[in-house]
Image (tube, rainbow, N blue to C red):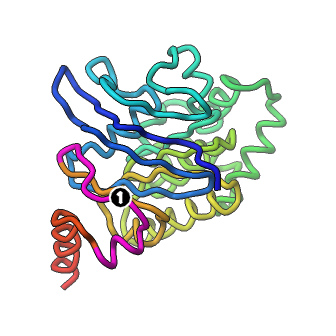
Amino acid sequence: MAEIIRYDQVDISYNGRLAVHDVSFSAAEGEILGIVGESGSGKSTLIKAAMGLLGRDGLVTRGDIWYKGLDLPDVPPKEMRKICGAQIGMIFQMAGSSFCPIRTVRAQLYEFMTEHEKISKQEFEERAQALLAKFGFQDPKRILDSYPFELSGGMQQRVGIAAAMLLNPKILMADEPTSALDVSVQKQVVEEMLMVRETFGTTILLVTHNLGVIGAMADKMIVLHKGEAMEYGNTKEILADPQSEYTKKLLSAVLKLRR
């Protein structure tokens, strides 16, 4: 499989304070890469850096993030607006907070689509309803008619995934997409993200602290600790035979919790 995104020796700082140091990894087309680590380890910072979402205080101070021959941190904001959403999608930790509460789901998804392509309301309606049906919604029209607060947390998250896939991006960045959900809904979201990969051939960068989700989904994984990579490679191999002491501690903590 051809490589689609690559991080080369990336450093990221906030207000001059180093948050990520010398991190390198890549993901191929249709591959799921898990980014694992405790809170504050730099997981979300890595994917936000690729989309220009570090805010005023964040900056990639060294290294490159390559996508289709472009070094993303150097792409001007106007050009990044064309890439984000259309070519690189994002699922946030709590999808409900990324929606405006006083506008219907339909109005927000339509606005998002028209930012990137010319589309009639009828064509949008057909595409949106078909996509929501693919994500298991029995009544897509009702979902589009709804306001975000009328949907459960699990439904908001699934609508967030569907929204990210409206334009069929090549890469999907997923920032802790299951952490705010109960176990049964987590399973459903995991299955739908796997469906996205199988149906659309999407590359997924999955940020999570949940090693169970990583084991179920990821082809490769990278383990972060205090902004540095402790381990990187095939998921099954790392989970079966971790080499770094930090990864061993993470796995040991999971086993203790299960017992």
Mark 1: secondary structure = strand
Q: Estimate the x, y position of residue 150 in percent, counting from the top left.
A: 49, 47
Give left or right: position of 20 versus 95: left
Q: Estimate the x, y position of residue 21 in percent, counting from the top left.
A: 24, 38
Q: Is residue 154 above or below residue 89?
A: below
How many neighbours does mark 1 have within 10 angstroms: few (below 14), some (14-19), or many (20 or more)?
some
Residue beneath the point at 17% across and 46% down: 226
Residue beneath the point at 60% across and 43% down: 163
The number of discs equals: 1
Looking at the image, which residue sits at the far bottom? 259
Residue beneath the point at 21% across and 54% down: 38
Q: Is residue 158 magenta?
A: no
Q: Is residue 28 above or below residue 60?
A: below
Near-viewer residue (153 or 243): 243
Q: Which residues are magenta?
A: 226-241
Q: Estimate the x, y position of residue 48 in percent, counting from the top left.
A: 39, 35
Q: Is residue 83 above or below residue 185?
A: above
Residue beneath the point at 45% across and 33% down: 65
Amino acid marked by disc 1: Tyr
Q: Is residue 114 above or below residue 41?
A: above
Give left or right: position of 77 versus 177: right
Near-viewer residue (72 or 88): 72
Quarter the C terminus occupies: bottom left
Q: Estimate the x, y position of residue 251 in percent, counting from the top left.
A: 23, 72
Residue 129 seen in this snapshot: yes
Near-viewer residue (124 or 208): 208
Q: Which residue is mark 1?
A: 232
Locate residue 63: give its quadrant: top left
Quarter the N terminus occupies: bottom right
Q: Is residue 228 magenta?
A: yes
Residue 180 seen in this snapshot: no
